Image (tube, rainbow, N blue to C red):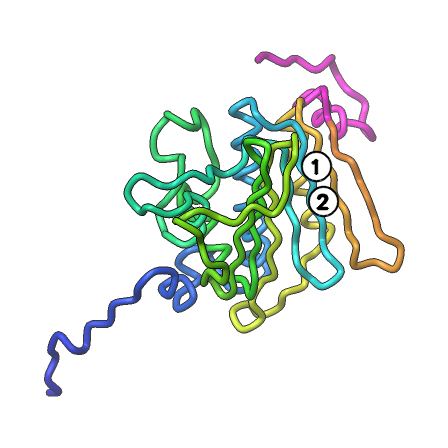
Amino acid sequence: MSEYTGKEIVILEGLEAVRKRPGMYIGSTGSRGLHHLIWEILDNSIDEHLAGFCDEIHITMRGDGGICIEDNGRGVPVDIHPTKKVSTVRVVYTILHAGGKFDSSAYKTSGGLHGVGSSVVNALSTQLTVTVKSGGLIHQDKYEYGNPVIELVDGLLPVIGKTRETGTTINFTPDPSIFDKTWFKAEEVKSRLHETAYLNPKLTIVFRDKRLETPEEIIYQEPEGIVGYVKDLNKNKEAIHDIIYYS
């Protein structure tokens, strides 16, 4: 029997564990896991909407195979994190279990992997860029394979411009060495976005597919909410009674 000692115990630091065992975090490295990357970033924007700070989300399938998700919420906090002593953006995207969804102080309701999603998407991407508009300034951080490539100044992100807008924009490209295929299915994304619009009647979602020779753009806006969804289900059927809905 071979000797079993402490040297056989491997400790994976930071996001290394995610890249080593991605299935533990997103279910698989197939199509389902690939699209889960979009859902995680989308859920963060939806949470901002549910908190009352975001009413528009843009999702673009880029020509190079990457994804861009932009919202007009408050923006990921850019100030210095009280314990990590660096910009909170850097903490959220590089440290597992760092997020504003563990208690009710920032979000009353939330979806996604609760503090894991953003950093997992970063870990499984060849590149990810976070652009935050808040406080009249535009801040940006960049990563490659989950690792920061921008040097912070006194712990803060560089300012790349000024703006009166607020919100967060995430650009990421899935890592082909992790996933079986990195081609996102437009129909699957559009279906999810339409369902999301039905569940959030005050939200506008703009979908763009720039991979096509003639780029496609669809605006999902369902002010009737669930009622509109039921009407859509019944459009080719004869309804027995009017839709009954309580909120």
What secondary structure is found at the residue carrying circle 2?
Answer: helix
Q: Position of residue 138 (x, y in %)?
A: 59, 41
Q: Is residue 116 left or right of residue 201?
A: left
Identified at 56% across, 34% down, the residue is: 134
- Which quadrant of the view contains residue 162? top right
Residue nearest the observer in this picture, 214 or 193: 214
Q: Which residues are magenta?
A: 222-247
- Residue at 74% x, 43% y: name it: 207
Taking the magenta stretch, the answer to whether it contains residue 5 is: no
Verify CB contact (< 8 Å) between mark 2 and mark 1. yes
Q: Which residue is mark 1?
A: 194
User: In 3D space, how far apart are the residues under numbered discs 2 and 1 (Cα atoms)?
Assistant: 6 Å
Per the picture, the main secondary structure of the magenta-coloured stretch is: loop
Label 1: few (<14), some (14–19) or many (≥20) C-alpha neighbours in 10 Å? some
Q: Is residue 83 above or below residue 125?
A: above
Q: Could you tell me which residue is drawn at 61 percent across and 44 percent down?
A: 169
Counting the numbered discs, the total is 2
Q: Secondary structure at mark 1?
A: helix
Q: What amino acid does circle 2 point to?
A: Lys
Foreground residue among 82 and 192: 82
Say whether residue 238 is left or right of residue 168. right
Instruction: Work out which quarter of the rendered image holds the C terminus and state it.
Output: top right
User: Would you name the residue on which mark 2 appears?
Assistant: 190
- Most extreme residue toward the front is 154
Q: Position of residue 129 (x, y in %)?
A: 57, 54
Where residue 240 sits in the image (x, y, percent)? 75, 16
Report the amino acid beneath label 1: His
Q: Is residue 9 left or right of residue 169?
A: left
